[in-house]
Amino acid sequence: MNFHLKVWRQKDANSPGRLEDYEARNIPPDASFLEMLDIVNEDLISKGIEPIVFDHDCREGICGMCSLTINGIPHGPSTGTTCQLYMRKFEDGSTIYIEPFRAGPFPVIRDLSVNRSALDRIIQAGGFISERTGSAPDANSIPIPKTIADEAMDAAACIGCGACAAACPNSSAMLFVAAKVSHLNLLPQGKPEKDRRVLSMVEQMDKEGFGGCSNFYQCEAVCPAHIPASFIAKMNRDYLVASIKRTVGVMP
């Protein structure tokens, strides 16, 4: 298979970027999108041209590092991550636009690689529990209804890739924050910090420059972990309750 690529090249966050044209020749249909870029980079290196910089790690759809916007869609036309997107999904001879995740809090490091440390700082603001992990009680000693456990696991499936923010017209990270808040708030071990957690993480999200949710649901559409937007509504309720408690001075 052969493709014409229009790839975003940018030296750093403070330099202007541009789309450059490249040819991807003799690409196996079963090659992943990242393997296709590897082939293109090998050809560029052999010609003495600087290779295209992009993020990757596990290449198994687990880590969320492969932050590429493909033909305007974060992670491309698939229901998973970029590394799980195969070239047979594209028409032979087609033109493919490849850009970094587009969100203000994700400054470009180089080319297709962006800095998503803003998500880490949101986690640091409240994504933890007070249980002593070195002497945690046996899991079966705290009965949890299966419906609650399943809902917490659904939220915990978030891999923190940032596609939700990249897809949102407002660059909102609400789906990411809602997932990280909810999977702890739903479980008994997360209850002691429940109110402080949602306040701290939402306020940190605002400090990082992410926008608010306007219910476009683009986040839900591109999420590789298929996390539903209903978690945003749950987080909003938790935030409202915590805000009232803080206002009246009854925070635990």
Image: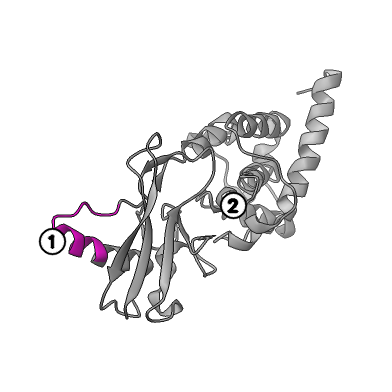
User: Range of the magenta residues?
Assistant: 40-52
Residue at the spot 60% in from the left edge and 33% down from the top edge: 209
Count the marks: how many? 2
Label 1 crowd (10 A; few <14 / some 14-19 / many >=20): few
What amino acid type should be assigned to the residue bearing mark 1?
Ser
Q: Nearer the viewer, residue 18 or 141?
A: 18
- In the picture, residue 97 is in which quadrant? bottom left
Secondary structure beneath dot 2 equals helix
Q: Quadrant of residue 49?
A: bottom left
User: Can residue 152 be seen in the rendering of this structure?
Assistant: yes
Q: What numbered label is drawn on residue 46? A: 1
Is residue 189 located in the magenta-colored stretch of the structure?
Answer: no
158 or 139: nearer the viewer? 158
The mark that comes first in sequence, 1 or 2, is 1
At label 2, which amino acid type do we have?
Cys
Disc number lying in front (1 or 2): 1
